Structures are given as structure tokens and as C-alpha cells.
Image (spheres, rainbow, N blue to C red):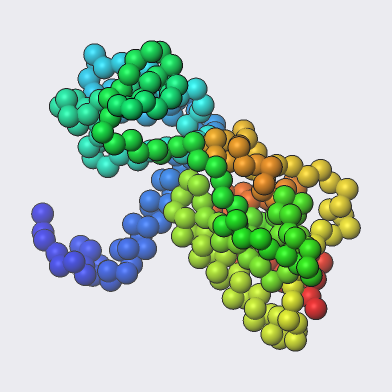
Amino acid sequence: MRSHSPKSCGSCTSKRMWIHEIVRKKILHDQDVFTRRSFTEPDVVKQELLGAVRAHLGPDYDVDTHFTHGYRPWRQRIAFIPDGDLFQGIRAGKASVVTDEIERFTETGILLKSGKVLAADIIITATGFNLNVLGDIAFTIDGEPLVFSDTVTYRGMMFTGVPNMAWVFGYFRASWTLRADLVADFVCRLLKHMKEKGARKMTPALRPEDKDKPLLPWIDPENFNPGCIMRGMHLLPKRGDTPEWEHTQDYWNEKDQFPAIDLDDDTFIYE
């Protein structure tokens, strides 16, 4: 095999930035295919994931107890383990997994509901937190407190009745910054449009055809249901049943939809 400089790709002498873009698109495509399969064939995907775990830990390890969940893949976030280093540590006896529920903390560790005690010098909590919405900032509009849960989300980045504010919220199942870039590009385009119109304020609002439609929880629990989201759902904005009033978590649609948003749509109230 011929060797090539980092700036070349075979005989095509591709620029490094092209290689980066090709690899990036390949990763995004593979992530999207895997995510869609988790909806269309969840049992197959589940067995593929568990098969990879068994391949690392061996046939005698109790994978069913310690690594099998009751929800379908990607209904909650999936832990990525580069090079299987966690599994290598378990197989080598350097780490162990105990699957149980916590009864309470003790002076020396953790008492589990099974009655077993785990001795611990240090305990690091990694779940069970309560959602912090808008950084607990007490927003007011014309002197009235903003009740975030009374608003309806516009594409997961703006909210009805809230002027001049965009919320940067990324993707659960892909790179967070993919969506941050889409939101930033939209805000820049919107600010330019406001300047051209001589407007100092823009407030999203439901259109007449939207007002009789059902309002739903911010995200469909059948789609994504981690405990922190479910416990804080009452604090989050509502969503509608059409794409403009939803936070779809679908990069492959949003990358085309966001640049095509009509800034003169009746959704946007300029002043």
C-alpha cells in the first residue's frame, strides 16, 4: 500500500478540510441510521448492543442483570464506551458492577434495598438530579413573571409570548453543537431581517389556525424519557402537533428546515 501525506487521499490529493467533511458526514449518517433503527427494529438493536457487551465480558458474566434495560435503545441515552475500556476493567477484575436500588447512605457506604452494604470511601452521584430550567433565572415580561410552562415552543428555540429570546438546546442523539450552529445561523438571519424592517422586538405567537390544536408535553415520552426530563416536564414549555411547534431532535430535517424558515410568517410578530 502506498503511503500518502496527511493532505492527500490516494491520487486525488484531497485537502484536509475535505477529508474532515467526508468523515463528519459519514459519522452523522451512521448515527442517524442507528437512531432510526432503534425505532423501527428496537429488539434487533438491543440484541446487537448486548452482543457487543457479551463479546467483551465473556459468556459467564451476568449481562442480563447488569446491562439489560427495560426501555428500548435510545429511549434514554446510550453510554458510549471507547475501546470497551470499562468492560476490559471488569473482565480484569479491576472494576465491578452491582445492580440494585439505594435504600440510604451509611457512615461507611451505601445500604441497598436487597440488604447488601457497599463500602465506599467516595460516592459520586451520576443520576437522580432535578432539572434546572433557564438557569433558575427569574425572568419577567413587563413586570410580570414568566411562567415558562405556559408558553409553546417554536422549534425548540423560541417561545410564544417571550420577545427577543432564543434558547440554544442541542440534540440528545447527535452532537449538541450541530443544533447550536443551526440556532445561531437562524438568530443571525433573524437579526438581519429585523434591522431591515426597522423592528426592535420580535415575539413568536400562535397563528389563528394553531390556537385550537392540542398542546402536548415538551417531548413525547415514547420518544425520549430519561428521569430528569420526566420529573421536570411540568416546568418545560408545551409543544404542538406540527413541526414548527415541536422540538423534533431530527438534524437531517432541521438542517434544511431552519434555513428555509419564512421570517415574514404570521408566527413572528414584529414591533
Residue 6 placement, left or right of 21: left
- Residue 255 visible within the image: no
Q: Please tell me which residue lies in front, 256 or 87.
A: 87
Q: Is residue 185 above or below residue 147?
A: below
Locate the C terminus and report the quarter of the image it occupies.
bottom right
Q: Residue at 38% x, 51% y: name it.
A: 27
Residue 105 seen in render: yes
**Horizontal side, residue 170 vs residue 212: left or right:** left
Farthest front residue in view: 107
Question: Residue 189, percent across and down?
Answer: 62, 76
Picture coordinates of residue 44 (x, y %)? 44, 25
Compared with residue 198, is residue 114 higher up or lower down, i.e. above or below?
A: above
The residue depicted at 38 percent of the width and 52 percent of the height is: 26
Residue 244 drawn above or below residue 103: below
How many tags in the picture? Answer: 0
Q: Position of residue 208 (x, y in %)?
A: 89, 58
Q: Viewer-proximal residue, 167 or 104?
A: 104
Instruction: Judge left or right: residue 267 versus residue 42.
Output: right
Residue occupying image coordinates x 74% and y 54%: 147
On screen, residue 64 versus residue 172, left or right, reads left
Can you give x and y, in whole percent of width and height, for residue 169 in the image? 55, 56
Residue at left 50%, top 40%?
A: 129
- Quadrant occupied by the N terminus: bottom left
Depth check, front residue: 158 or 175: 158
